[in-house]
Image: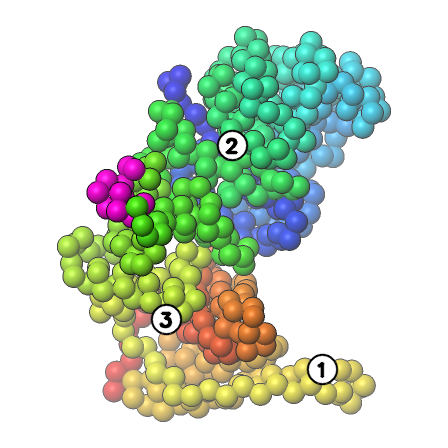
């Protein structure tokens, strides 16, 4: 292994889920895991088996990844139990994950106060758990909780915990700054001291961001000898969050000369992956985020613009395209082509970079994003937009009109019920069709009405199902008249998932736009032929 090789471990699906206001569904976790895999992350922590139904569902049907290894997180055995009979450890083994990360305490104060056990018993818990886990899975990591506080309190004991895990067979020991209070100079000093006992090839770090130093601490730790860095996308996490891998990764690769599993081509997807996570969480991306924010390479008039036009290096520390971003001159947006071409490659569209249609598509994307569309979390809608501009989408059907009626009333049993009914009028192959359907809400009713007409004609739609639905208000000052964005995630019996987007001042109209794209994408992907007269 090269001494410059840094391994990347993402904890978004577990640590990120502890963010206030964040509630990942299983579909969200699968989509994010696939995005992380495409980016080139080495390890993806899927969650804590046995802790909640969402994590159990994720491990029961994990996504098929090409590059990353899914990791299960859990605790060392409990005091007074054997490793073989500990329910928490057994839940880890039952998850099917071949890589485990087990957390144990390394701060003497925390051991005696939080666990209420002796220091020797805690050491035995670490050794027993790691040793037993090594007989059950391919790779075991020890997550040294509160290590930096523990080292400051009693360095000999903190190191004995780490040594115990390594002697028991741990592949990595990860030094955790659990309360986020460590500063960069402390991180460098302590990691450097530990590196005298632990080889770099087995040493990792995980910093929380309570002092705003998690990224700086991670980089300082790498310089001091750590060769695994843990963190989350966009710095998600409880309290103030975790080290932000979206900042750590390009800094390691572009600024410090380290090697990671994220290639130069992968790095061009960084902004897309960052924004995809925000879209999955139904929240606006941070415009001022380093590297990937919309304003990260924005210039507003005057001397700065003049200097940038002569040589961008005057005010840009890297070329924005390296991380999938672009330069933004406030009076005239000058970018887009490289981003669009990268997205073409991602969805499998082969087009020449000099094709004039690329410029047309760039403008179409800009116009639609100005209207409120967001394609980072809706790859299927982006692909359809691209193929429509390039002339590659058949006209499977033509919606002439739809009407949705909602009724809220008391039924004969005295129960308050809400009923939705949709009427749709379509043309398929030039032939008119009309259908009426009821549903559990207006979107479901509209979906059922469309299916009544389309499924007999296009049997490919039989297994299409909606698995997630999100609405965001884009103009909150407009109150109930606000423009809304609807994101729909769909799936089929083959396990394929895709997301589509619709925007309108009418939430039902926005929902139809997203639903229409979902149906058309399914038909196009399955190779359906449009019905002709």
The residue furthest front is: 302
Give the quadrant of the C terminus: bottom left
Mark number, residue 215: 2
**Residues at circles 3 and 2 in contact by the CB criterion of under 8 Å:** no
Query: Marks 3 and 1, Cα distance to the nearest angstrom?
Result: 33 Å
**Which residue is disc 3 drawn over?**
520
Image quadrant assignment for residue 182: top right
The mark found on residue 417 in the picture is 1
Q: CA distance from mark 1 to mark 2?
A: 52 Å
Residue 164 versus residue 168: which sits nearer the camera?
Answer: 164
Q: Nearer the viewer, mark 3 or mark 2?
A: 2
Report the magenta residues as a range: 304-314
Pick the residue in front: 31 or 139.
31
Q: What SS does tag 3 mark?
A: helix
Q: Is disc 1 placed on a helix, strand or loop?
A: strand
Q: Main secondary structure of the magenta part?
A: helix
Residue 128 seen in render = no
The stretch drawn in magenta includes residue 313: yes
Q: Quadrant of residue 129?
A: top right
Quarter of the image that includes the N terminus: top left
Q: Residue at x 74, y 34 (%)?
A: 87
Q: Residues within 10 Å of mark 2 (few under 14, many from 20)?
A: many
């Amino acid at each position: 292994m090269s001494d410059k090789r840094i391994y990347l471990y993402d904890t978004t699906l577990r640590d990120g889920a502890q963010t206030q206001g964040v509630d990942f569904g299983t579909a969200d976790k699968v989509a994010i895991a696939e995005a992380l895999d495409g980016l080139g992350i080495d390890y993806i922590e899927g969650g804590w088996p046995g802790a909640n139904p969402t994590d159990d569902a994720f491990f029961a049907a994990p996504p098929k990844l090409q590059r990353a290894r899914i990791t299960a997180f859990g605790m060392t055995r409990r005091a007074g139990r054997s490793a073989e009979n500990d329910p928490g450890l057994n839940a880890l083994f039952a998850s099917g994950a071949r890589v485990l990360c087990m957390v144990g305490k390394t701060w003497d104060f925390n051991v005696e106060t939080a666990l209420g056990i002796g220091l020797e018993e805690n050491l035995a818990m670490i050794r027993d758990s790691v040793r037993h886990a090594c007989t059950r899975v391919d790779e075991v990591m020890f997550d040294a909780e509160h290590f930096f506080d523990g080292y400051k309190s009693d360095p000999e004991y903190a190191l004995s915990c780490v040594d115990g895990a390594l002697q028991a067979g741990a592949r990595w020991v990860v030094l955790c700054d659990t309360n986020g209070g460590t500063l960069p100079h402390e991180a460098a000093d302590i990691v450097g001291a530990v590196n005298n006992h632990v080889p770099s090839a087995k040493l990792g770090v995980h910093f929380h961001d309570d002092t705003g130093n998690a990224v700086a601490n991670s980089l300082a730790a790498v310089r001091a000898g750590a060769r695994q860095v843990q963190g989350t996308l966009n710095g998600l996490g409880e309290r103030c969050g975790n080290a932000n891998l979206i900042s750590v990764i390009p800094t390691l690769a572009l600024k410090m000369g380290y090697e990671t599993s994220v290639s130069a081509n992968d790095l061009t997807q960084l902004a897309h992956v960052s924004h995809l996570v925000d879209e999955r969480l139904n929240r606006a991306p941070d415009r001022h985020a380093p590297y990937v924010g919309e304003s990260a390479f924005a210039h507003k008039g005057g001397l700065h613009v003049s200097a940038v036009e002569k040589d961008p290096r005057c005010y840009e520390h890297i070329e924005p395209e390296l991380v999938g971003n672009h330069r933004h001159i406030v009076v005239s947006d000058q970018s887009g082509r490289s981003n669009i071409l990268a997205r073409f490659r991602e969805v499998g569209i082969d087009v020449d970079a000099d094709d004039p249609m690329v410029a047309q598509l760039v403008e179409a994307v800009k116009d639609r994003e100005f209207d409120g569309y967001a394609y980072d979390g809706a790859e299927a809608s982006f692909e359809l937009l691209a193929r429509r501009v390039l002339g590659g989408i058949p006209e499977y059907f033509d919606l002439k009109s739809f009407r949705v009626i909602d009724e809220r009333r008391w039924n004969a049993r005295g129960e308050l019920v809400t009923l939705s009914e949709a009427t749709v009028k379509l043309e398929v192959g030039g032939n008119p069709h009309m259908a009426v359907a009821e549903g559990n809400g207006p979107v479901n009713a509209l979906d059922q009405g469309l299916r009544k007409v389309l499924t007999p004609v296009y049997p490919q739609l039989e297994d299409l199902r909606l698995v997630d639905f999100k609405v965001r208000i884009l103009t909150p000052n407009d109150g109930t008249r606000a423009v809304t964005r609807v994101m729909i995630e769909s799936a089929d019996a083959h396990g394929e998932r895709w997301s589509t987007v619709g925007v309108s001042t009418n939430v039902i109209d926005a929902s139809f736009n997203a639903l229409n794209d979902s149906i058309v994408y399914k038909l196009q992907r399955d190779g359906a032929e449009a019905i002709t007269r």
